Image (spheres, helix red, strand yellow):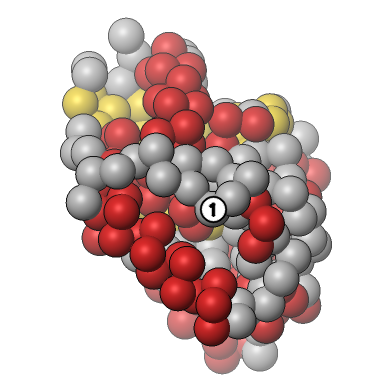
């Protein structure tokens, strides 16, 4: 089994992010101007690295975040396993008080171990974790030594749990920002974290007006 370094990035900002509208996997929104600037800042900061493949979800906000790398001709693959969680009947709606209360109750259930709880018509934490585990199995088997992955907030929380080998009840400990970077080094079967939600690439380019 080859050792490898994996850069895991959350997508850039969308208008739905900005206005507090629930996205999930059923809403395929594009990046807004700030999101495109965040993507460019990330690219400028890390374009000197020789990434061997770009792995994204099947949603366009991850494709657009990685577009500068993809346009370079770096090998690109899409995985439904790292699509955002389905938030069911909440998707496409602005977070009203009743929705926020339902969400808080769901988080309480997940934190206490009821991983089968879900928003009506949505996906449970257990289902999210199962597909993320499939992606990690694929990640382990790849032969490249430097990979770039772009996914979504809740999915990344689950992904970090799997990589750290901690239960999904720990998901809410892990924070994520738009284009926040988690850098992971695989050594045999273990994953070691070198960076967690690093956004230094954004402050580095503020002077350029991004």
Q: Judge left or right: residue 120 versus residue 153.
A: right
* Image coordinates for residue 167, horizontal then vertical, percent: 22, 39
Is 8 in front, or is 24? 24
Indicate whether 47 appears above or below 15.
above
Residue at image coords 78%, 60%: 29
Res. 205 visible in picture: no
Residue at image coords 28%, 28%: 186
* Image coordinates for residue 80, horizontal then vertical, percent: 65, 31
Q: How many numbered marks are there? A: 1
Q: Judge left or right: residue 15 versus residue 184.
A: right
Is 80 in front, or is 92? 92
Most extreme residue toward the top is 1
Indicate whether 46 appears above or below 39.
above
* Image coordinates for residue 7, horizontal then vertical, percent: 44, 44
Residue at image coords 54%, 41%: 123
Q: Label 1: few (<14), some or many (≥20) within 10 Å?
A: some
Indicate whether 100 appears above or below 47.
below
Residue at image coords 46%, 66%: 103
Res. 32 visible in picture: yes
Label 1, secondary structure: give it.
Answer: loop
Q: Judge left or right: residue 59 versus residue 131.
A: right
For label 1, the residue is 119
- The quarter holding residue 24 reads bottom right
- The quadrant the N terminus occupies is top left
């Amino acid at each position: 089994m080859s050792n490898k370094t994996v850069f895991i990035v959350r997508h850039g900002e969308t208008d739905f992010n900005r206005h507090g509208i629930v996205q999930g996997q059923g809403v395929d929104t594009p990046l807004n101007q700030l999101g495109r600037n965040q993507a460019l800042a990330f690219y400028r900061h890390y374009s000197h690295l020789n990434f061997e493949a770009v792995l994204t979800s099947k949603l366009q906000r991850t494709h657009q975040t990685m577009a500068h790398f993809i346009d370079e001709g770096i090998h690109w693959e899409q995985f439904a396993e790292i699509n955002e969680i389905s938030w069911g009947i909440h998707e496409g709606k602005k977070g009203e008080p009743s929705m926020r209360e339902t969400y808080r109750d769901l988080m309480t259930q997940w934190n206490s171990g009821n991983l089968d709880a879900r928003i009506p018509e949505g996906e449970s934490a257990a289902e999210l974790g199962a597909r993320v585990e499939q992606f990690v199995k694929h990640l382990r088997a790849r032969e490249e030594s430097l990979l770039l992955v772009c996914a979504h907030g809740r999915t990344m929380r689950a992904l970090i749990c799997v990589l750290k080998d901690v239960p999904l009840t720990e998901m809410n400990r892990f924070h994520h920002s738009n284009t926040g970077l988690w850098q992971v080094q695989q050594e045999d079967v273990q994953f070691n974290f070198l960076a967690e939600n690093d956004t230094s690439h954004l402050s580095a380019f503020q002077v350029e007006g991004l």
